[in-house]
Amino acid sequence: MRIINQLTSSDGAVKRVHELSDGNTVESVVIPHKTKTNICVSSQVGCRRGCVFCATGKRFVRNLTPDEILGQIDVPVDSVVFMGMGEPLDNPDIIEAVERVKKEKGIPSRKIAVSTCGIIDKMDLLLPTKVNISISLNATDDNTRSRLMPINHKFNLTALKEKMFELDSKIPGRRRLLIEYVLIKGVNDSLSDAERFSELVPKKSLINLIPLNSISEDYEAPDKPAVEAFKAELMKQGFACFVREPRGKDVRAACGMLSSASRME
Ligand code: SF4
């Protein structure tokens, strides 16, 4: 595989387009921080999960091999997140890829995070790897979550809640479940949406609020005061909560913006 395009954001994030041996393309994003560098890697060409706010979920082509996943990590990095294109737990080789990242790239498990839209029956596979488990929640009622994320028709919030509490009790020591919540104006950003967190999510979890990086006119990000009010409600409930600043938005490298159409950009 080779890099056929590279776009550097004004904030320093670098989106790279990797061409695979069969001509398909996937993207990775190298994100420099003050003293460390993080990389976000893809696990599939496209994704079959079809979340409405995500550019990747518009089509699915195939899973990546472990070699193709490791091939994206071609620069020195301190941490690796499986949050690029694809649903990692839909790729049967994901555990092999994670173990090889640890062994061959020297990244400790605590510096690796695997994100899932909520494939409940496969989450246990991650426990022996000891990596951080990140769950995309994105709504606190079934109607809204089903509208945003088709996976909710198969594994609804009752099932997801049960799994989150089970994982919370099984993950080692000070580790926390990571909960991702993409905030969408008028859809899932009200205070009543926030108020339902405490009955759904284990209190020890670390919540990442991600104002939507919009890919269409159908959905937009909330205004800053709405984001701050949502965060304040979660903190009032006792959650550790951060608003994730978008990185690489100007080169379509931010969360939910990756798609293999970038070959043409
Ligand atoms: S958000 Fe994740 S699971 Fe959903 S369509 Fe996008 S890549 Fe797939």
Image (cartoon, rainbow, N blue to C red):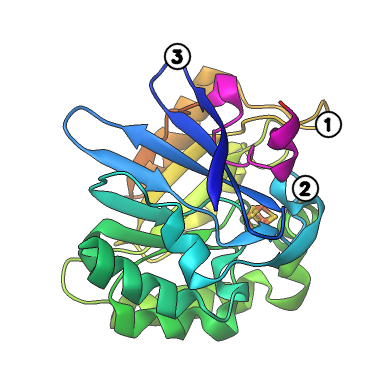
Q: CA distance from mark 1 to mark 2?
A: 9 Å
Q: What residue is rendered at 73% in x and 58% in y?
A: 149
Q: Amino acid at mark 2?
A: Val
* Residue named by callout 3: 10
Q: Is residue 64 above or below residue 192?
A: below
Does the magenta-highlighted stretch encompass residue 96?
A: no
Q: Amino acid at mark 1?
A: Asp
Q: Position of residue 205 (x, y in %)?
A: 34, 59
User: Which of the 4 image quarters holds residue 65?
Assistant: bottom right
Instruction: Give the SS element for disc 1.
Output: loop
Q: What residue is rendered at 61% in x and 29% in y?
A: 252
Within 10 Å of disc 2 (Cα), the crowding (few <14, some 14-19, many 20+) is some
Q: Is residue 258 above or below residue 134?
A: above
Instruction: Give the SS element for disc 2.
Output: loop
Dot 1 and dot 2 residues touching (CB under 8 Å):
yes
Decide which of 206, 235 is in the foreground and name it. 206
Q: What residue is rendered at 77% in x and 47% in y?
A: 52
Q: What residue is rendered at 75% in x and 38% in y?
A: 261
Identify the disc placed on residue 218: 1
Identify the disc placed on residue 230: none
